[in-house]
Image: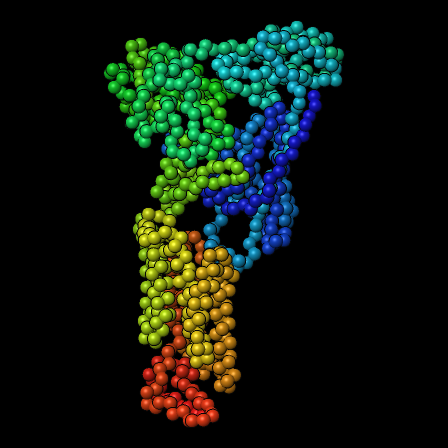
């Protein structure tokens, strides 16, 4: 046959270390029907500072593949919440073949058509908190490319019609397809009138949705007469592919006929309560962001299963089948929730158990009158059961496959000899099916995040306080309440260290500086009280406001301290303008990027530059170093600078997520302590001698406050008068 090759690619994306599903990169592809092979080229390369990252360490990259919905991955081997079904997926780990680039290839023969999802991530790291812009970060970029080869003009078989075929010597096989509509219980494929020099040297293979593989359902026509292959419980509304393959080494031409027979199950046999619509379906909302879903009726579901309006009668002699329709792409990014509750009052004292089997694509109603199974040789569903003792059963399926899900309900009565069909009892159940973004909204130790990749929306939990798992229910590494309380108290109470700088500033008449320190102490305390990951949290206003005020107060504390150290008042008459300028510059920098290194460091360096210019001007004018006393350098400036440098080093290179609560508390203590050392004393003019009266006429008067020039800690201990010359 003729082949058509299609090529799809996605833009490269930066990979992140795995912490939760919210940290992975998700890629969405669509494979067309009749595809015989799909090849994914997985390209990964390193970057550092805009160039190739040859010096970056090799880190393994894990890629997950799944058809129909995103993969439910668990690389950390955490526990899933109760009543959660975990669908499988295929994983591939890429290794590096070149210093800065590697390529992996993943082939899928006869892939299932429709949506395919790739998820990729780096291994979990130690959680180091790095300062943005401090150094060039190693980036690992991942770009998947898809090449598909599909057949065109595949012969279509029509049920009940015979198709003649003659296979030439150079041909190995013939491929057909037949469409299976709804309410089909059996597909029978038969090869008739097979003629060749060696009997009927043919293999007959059948597969749903995609061309058959070597391990598909196979029949050797040499060993079976007639050559018939049956498929019970076929997938509804899908193509079935039939491959007739010739044995190797068979000479000559092989002629045969192919026919397909479909067995239609009676539609009225499906139990349907009178209040349900004709399709007996539950149509999920188009987006899992909306509340609830439609639960078997025309009205939205109640808030609790106990408030469900309509009980569903289960016939005692046959299963009742219901269908849940999930729309492609739109409904696969959340969690499918199913709740089944037995109306115990309807049992009339009988020991009745209602079994439910939920399966994708086809209803599974297999089982005899004494048992219920939820699997066949090629299919496996999810089994639920309710009785008088356990009247409620739940099932959660994260990232469900789209399409039709079928729920088969069957009631059996327990006896001494096992289960038997119920005779005079019609059990009633309440059924609720709905989509939710996350499982139980991720609980109290998690946050449900709505994520997007191109036009695909999905949700995932981001856990905190050491909790892990798909629903943030795994407490193996969880922080205890005492630890959370200790962390909060350390981060909040460490800001009390700003009280001594406030007292020093007030005593030295630095009222503006004292106000800034109080502002910083207040908002830093309540920001960290609101920023805690656990349940020991207290927010007096919105988190973003607290964070902005905390960052602004911290940087303004540095700014006003450095400007005060510059002592510009005798030089610049309107030195207060610099305080306003600093507030405006820092507000702009924080609004641009709150975590950018140079946006925060730039204004601080600007203030240090002003101080350096002021000190240099004094040094040149006075012809000696400023500040002039060695005590000021030895006991205040040098210790203060060393303490501030130690705080910056801890913040930039030592702080991690694990040690954050005590390293950041030490940062608070050191920064506040350095301010107490660096803040200069305020000079007081001497009251013993006033300035000399100004002479009339031309001339000038120069007043030098030598006490201010000395830069002593306590101006009261110096009794040097102001000397005026003209």
Outermost residue toward the front? 697
The front one of 10 and 118 is 10
Tag count in the figure? 0
The front one of 121 and 29 is 29
> In the rendered view of the protein, which quadrant contains the N terminus?
top right
Res 668 → quadrant: bottom left
Q: Is residue 167 left or right of residue 441?
A: right
- Above or below, 664 against 235 in this view is below
- Above or below, 597 against 140 in this view is below
Q: In this view, does 593 lie to the left or right of 164?
A: left
Residue at image position (61%, 53%) is: 50
Residue 382 position within the rendered picture, expressed as x and y whole percent measured from the top left: 42, 24
Residue 646 position within the rendered picture, expressed as x and y whole percent measured from the top left: 45, 66
Q: Can residue 630 be seen in this view?
A: no
- Above or below, 464 against 377 in this view is below
Residue 104 position within the rendered picture, expressed as x and y whole percent measured from the top left: 62, 39
Res 561 → quadrant: bottom left
The front one of 680 and 102 is 680
Residue at image position (38%, 21%) is: 356
Residue at image position (61%, 8%) is: 161
Q: Can residue 194 be seen in this view?
A: yes
Q: Is residue 33 left or right of residue 292?
A: right
Residue 99 position within the rendered picture, expressed as x and y whole percent measured from the top left: 64, 49
- The colour scheme applied to this rendered structure is rainbow
Residue at image position (36%, 51%) is: 542
> In the rendered view of the protein, which quadrant contains the C terminus?
bottom left
């Amino acid at each position: 046959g003729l082949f058509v090759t299609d090529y799809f690619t996605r833009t490269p994306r930066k990979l992140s270390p795995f912490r939760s599903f919210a940290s992975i990169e998700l890629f969405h592809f669509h494979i067309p029907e009749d595809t015989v092979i799909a090849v994914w080229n997985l390209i990964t390369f390193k970057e550092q500072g805009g160039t190739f990252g040859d010096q970056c360490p090799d880190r393994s990259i894990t890629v997950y593949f799944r058809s129909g919905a995103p993969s439910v991955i668990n690389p950390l081997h955490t526990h899933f919440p109760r009543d959660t079904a975990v669908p499988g997926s295929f994983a591939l780990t890429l290794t590096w073949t070149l210093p800065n680039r590697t390529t992996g290839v993943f082939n899928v023969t006869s892939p299932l058509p429709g949506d395919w999802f790739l998820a990729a991530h780096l291994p979990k790291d130690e959680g180091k908190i790095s300062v943005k812009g401090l150094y060039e970060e190693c980036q690992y970029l991942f770009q998947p490319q898809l090449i598909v080869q599909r057949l065109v003009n595949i012969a279509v078989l029509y049920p009940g019609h015979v198709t003649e075929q003659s296979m030439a010597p150079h041909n190995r096989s013939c491929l057909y397809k037949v469409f299976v509509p709804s309410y089909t219980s059996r597909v029978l494929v038969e090869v008739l009138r097979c003629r060749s020099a060696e009997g009927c040297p043919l293999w007959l293979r059948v597969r749903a949705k995609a061309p058959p593989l070597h391990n598909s359902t196979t029949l050797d026509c040499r060993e079976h007469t007639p050559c018939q292959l049956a498929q019970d419980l076929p997938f509804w509304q899908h193509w079935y592919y039939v491959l007739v393959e010739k044995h190797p080494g068979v000479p000559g031409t092989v002629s045969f006929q192919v026919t397909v027979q479909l067995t239609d199950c009676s539609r009225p046999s499906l139990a349907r309560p009178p209040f349900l619509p004709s399709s007996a379906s539950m149509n999920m909302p188009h987006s899992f962001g909306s509340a609830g879903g439609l639960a078997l009726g025309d009205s939205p579901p109640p808030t609790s299963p106990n408030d469900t309006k309509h009980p569903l009668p289960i016939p005692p002699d046959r299963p009742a089948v219901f269908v849940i329709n999930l729309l492609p792409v739109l409904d696969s990014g959340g969690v499918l929730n199913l709740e089944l509750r037995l109306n115990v009052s309807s049992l009339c004292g009988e020991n009745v158990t209602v079994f439910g089997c939920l399966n994708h694509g086809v209803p599974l109603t297999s089982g005899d009158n004494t048992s219920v199974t939820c699997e066949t040789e090629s299919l496996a569903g999810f089994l639920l059961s309710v009785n008088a003792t356990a009247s409620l059963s739940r099932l959660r399926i994260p990232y469900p496959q789209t399409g039709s899900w079928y729920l088969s309900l069957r009631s059996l009565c327990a006896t001494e000899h096992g289960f038997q069909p119920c005779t005079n009892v019609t059990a009633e159940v309440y059924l609720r099916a709905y989509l939710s973004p996350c499982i139980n909204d991720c609980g109290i130790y998690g946050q449900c995040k709505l994520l997007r990749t191109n036009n695909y929306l999905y949700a995932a939990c981001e856990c905190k306080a050491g909790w892990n798992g798909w629903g943030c229910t795994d407490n193996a590494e969880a922080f205890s309440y005492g630890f959370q309380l200790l962390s909060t108290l350390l981060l909040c109470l460490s800001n009390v260290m700003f009280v001594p700088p406030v007292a020093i500033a007030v005593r030295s008449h630095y009222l503006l500086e004292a106000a800034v320190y109080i502002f910083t102490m207040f908002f830093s305390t309540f920001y960290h009280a609101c920023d805690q990951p656990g349940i020991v949290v207290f927010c007096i206003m919105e988190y973003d406001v607290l964070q902005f005020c905390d960052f602004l107060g911290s940087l303004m504390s540095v700014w006003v301290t450095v400007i005060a150290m510059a002592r510009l008042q005798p030089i610049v008459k309107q030195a207060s303008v610099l305080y306003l300028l600093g507030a405006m510059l820092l507000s702009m920098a924080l609004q641009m990027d709150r975590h950018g290194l140079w946006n925060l460091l730039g204004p601080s360096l600007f203030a240090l530059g002003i101080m350096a210019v002021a000190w240099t001007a004094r040094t040149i004018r006075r012809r000696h170093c400023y500040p002039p006393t060695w005590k000021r350098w030895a006991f205040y400036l040098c210790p203060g600078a060393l303490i501030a440098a130690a705080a910056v080093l801890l913040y930039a290179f030592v702080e991690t997520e694990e040690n954050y609560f005590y390293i950041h508390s030490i940062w608070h203590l050191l920064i506040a302590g350095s301010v107490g050392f660096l803040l200069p004393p305020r000079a007081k003019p001497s009251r013993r001698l006033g300035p000399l009266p100004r002479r009339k006429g031309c001339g000038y008067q120069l007043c030098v406050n030598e006490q201010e020039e000395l830069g002593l800690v306590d101006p009261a201990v110096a009794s040097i008068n102001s000397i005026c010359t003209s």
